[in-house]
Every structure is written in structure tokens, then in C-alpha cells.
Image: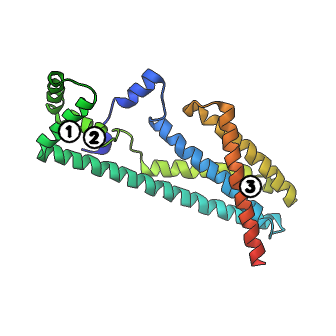
Amino acid sequence: MKVNELESPLEFRLKNWHGEDWHTPKGRIIRDVVYAVDTGLITTIAFLAGVSVSLVITQDILLAGIAHIASGTIAIFFGAYISTKAQKEFFHNQIEREKKEIEELPEKETEEIRHIFRDFGFEEDDLEVVVKRITADKELWLKFMIQEEIGLVPGTTDNPVRIGLISAASFAVGTIPAIAPFFFVHLISRALLISAILVAAFLFVLGVWKTRITKAHWFRSGIETLLFGGISCGVGFLLGRVVVALVR
């Protein structure tokens, strides 16, 4: 049985009873999008600020920035792909292990169900009714053990290629506000200032946008994203200045 065949009503209940999207595919994807966009914004502006110290021609900065964006996009794609694939393989192995234990050690698995429902407060008479109902259907049994014993919710695995592409595209989009001014403004200091303003605005908008899923206060989320993004940019810029100073 494949991982994606183990569909669970949990996602339906979260969305329809509580309007909760975080555990749905939409909710999981926003995590990757926000991370990748934020990374694209911060690393690109920090990189451009760093190289602008040693490069005095806008075209040279653009070429260096484009090379940074290309390498970063590829790195983000493969990083997201490999991590998602590893998670998917882990889920699959856990499910296969549980399936094997149900086949080979049914008494042990049945006792584990009893233990789970005792923790829920079930009395012995009701307990046996529930246990018999679950163990009578091996597919239901497997779903229950995956969710309740090892804490994996069926249906929560993602496609590695899809997540890789979404993350890479998000990273690339995040670089646009940082590098765009250098295409139109030839004075490096002015281009860098405009870039910093655009990145700050984009970070705030990103923080506000993610509240559509997180349900946090929009202004607080925007300021938080802007604050941490600004700190990261500042640290990246300072490190770049240190490296340039050491090279010189």
C-alpha cells in the first residue's frame, strides 16, 4: 500500500469544522513558499550590498547577482527536493513497518490499541467494542496505528519535485525586488537604496500575506517578518564587508 493511498478524514475535519488549513497541502506549501521567498530576498540584498563594496560598475554587480540567483535557485530546488524525498521515504518506511507488525504481531498491536483507548478514558466494556471494530478491518487498523501510535497523519506527504519547483520559483520571485533596481538605476548607491526599500516593503507584505493561513495579527506578522529579515540582511552585509576588508 502506497503512502498516498492512506487518505485520512482528519484533513477534511480540520478544514470544514474549524476552517483550519495549516495541515492541508495548502498549509504545508505556505511554509516552503515563505521560507524560499524570504531567503531569496535576504540573501540577494545582502549579496548585492557586499559586492557593491568591491565592484563599481553596475553591469558587474548585475552579472554577479544573476549568478548568485541562478546558483541559489538550483540549491533551493535540490535542497527542498532531497528533504521532502527523505521525509516521504521515512513516512513510507514507518507505514510499512506498522503494516508488517499488524501481520506478524497482531496480539501486540491489539494491546497497543487498548492502551491508547485506556488513555482516552474508555472503560473495559466499551474498550473491547472499539478494539474489535478497529481490528476487524486491517486497512482501518493500519490507518489508526499510523495516526495514533507513531503520530503520522495519512495524506501529509508531499511530492518532492513539486515542492522543489515551488521552493525554487519562490526563491527566484523573492530575488526580484532586490536586483530589479540595478537594471534601471546606474548609480550603485541609489540602486542599493531603492533595493533595500523594496526588500523591506516586500518582507512586510510577505508577513501580512502569510496570515491568510496562520490567522495571526496581520500587522504584528508583517513587522516580525520585516524585523527578522532586516537583522539577517544587516548581518549578511556586515559579514560581506568583513570579508572584503580581509581580502584587501
Q: Secondary structure at mark 3?
A: helix
For label 2, the residue is 149
Which is more N-terminal, label 2 or label 1? 1
Find residue 112 and name its label: 1
Q: Secondary structure at mark 1?
A: helix
Residue 70 quadrant: bottom right
Comparing labels 3 and 1, the label whose residue is closer to the camera: 1
Asked if the residues shown at circle 1 and circle 2 are in contact, with their CB atoms under 8 angstroms apart, the answer is yes
Q: Is residue 68 above or below residue 5?
A: below
Which residue is pictured at 81% across the width and 63% down the height?
58
Which is more N-terminal, label 2 or label 3? 2
Q: Secondary structure at mark 2?
A: loop
Q: Nearer the viewer, residue 94 or 202?
A: 94
Q: Is residue 170 above or below residue 235?
A: above
For label 3, the residue is 179
Q: Is residue 67 above or below residue 107?
A: below
